Image (cartoon, helix red, strand yellow):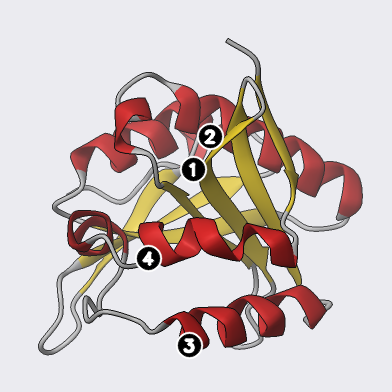
Amino acid sequence: MNITIRPLTLADKNLFYAWWNDLEIRALTAQVTEILTNKEIDEMIAENLVDQNNAEFIIEVDCKPIGHIRIKENNRKRYFMIDTAIGEKDYWGKGIGTIALNLAVEWFTKNHPDEEALELEVNTDNPRAIRCYEKVGFCKIAKKHYNGFKDTYLMRLMINHSPLRKCTFKV
């Protein structure tokens, strides 16, 4: 199996019509689960492609698109944020997310050598994603509660540091 990441293009929008409107995927990866229109998806992708603070990737297995990774600068926080989703359910639980996430972290460290860390939020009821992030070296640093939404863990990966020394939050 050849796992790669490549830059997102506008031609990839059809993938998101299915992935972002799959209620099971949205329940695992998003706080809001209502169906999105194709126009809303088109607008989000077009906006993300022109945002110089975002890096958007498609995860491919043997040249087949199966997921998405986004790295974005978070103006309110100190670190960049990363989001990952495997949109093709046949590829869940096979370790592909871990490999793809490692590729994205490698890209990030080469393109942002002065950055200290990457952060992400993951729903507390998504153990498969939490395991994936921990395998890459992300550590839970806080549990967050949003009124009316699912609880999440804030996880951080310290770049060029031993992640085991940074895992101090106990759940």
Q: Which residue appears at 77% of the width and 48% of the height?
A: 108
Mark 2, residue position: 163
Task: Looking at the image, tell me whether mark 2 or mark 4 is earlier in sequence order.
Answer: 4
Left or right: residue 50 versus residue 158 is: right
Q: Amino acid at mark 3?
A: Glu
Instruction: For mark 2, give the secondary structure.
Output: helix
Mark 4, residue position: 20
Q: Amino acid at mark 1?
A: Lys
Q: Amino acid at mark 2?
A: Pro
Up the image or down, 136 lies above or below 39; here it is above
The x and y percentages for residue 11 are 70, 61
Up the image or down, 36 lies above or below 66; here it is below
Bin the neighbour count of mark 1 within 10 Å (Cα to Cα): few under 14, some 14-19, many 20 and up.
some
Report the Cα–Cα distance between label 1 and label 4. 33 Å
In the displayed orientation, state which residue is furthest to the top.
Answer: 1
Q: How many numbered marks, from 0 up? A: 4
Mark 3, residue position: 40
Quarter that holds the N terminus: top right
The x and y percentages for residue 100 are 59, 33
Mark 1, residue position: 166
Bin the neighbour count of mark 3 within 10 Å (Cα to Cα): few under 14, some 14-19, many 20 and up.
few
Q: Are marks 3 and 2 in contact (CB under 8 Å)?
A: no
Instruction: For mark 1, give the secondary structure.
Output: helix
Q: Which residue appears at 81% of the width and 81% of the height?
A: 50
Report the Cα–Cα distance between label 4 and label 3. 11 Å
Q: Quadrant of residue 45?
A: bottom right
Q: Are marks 1 and 4 in contact (CB under 8 Å)?
A: no
Instruction: For mark 4, give the secondary structure.
Output: loop
Residue 77 visible within the image:
no
Report the Cα–Cα distance between label 2 and label 4. 31 Å
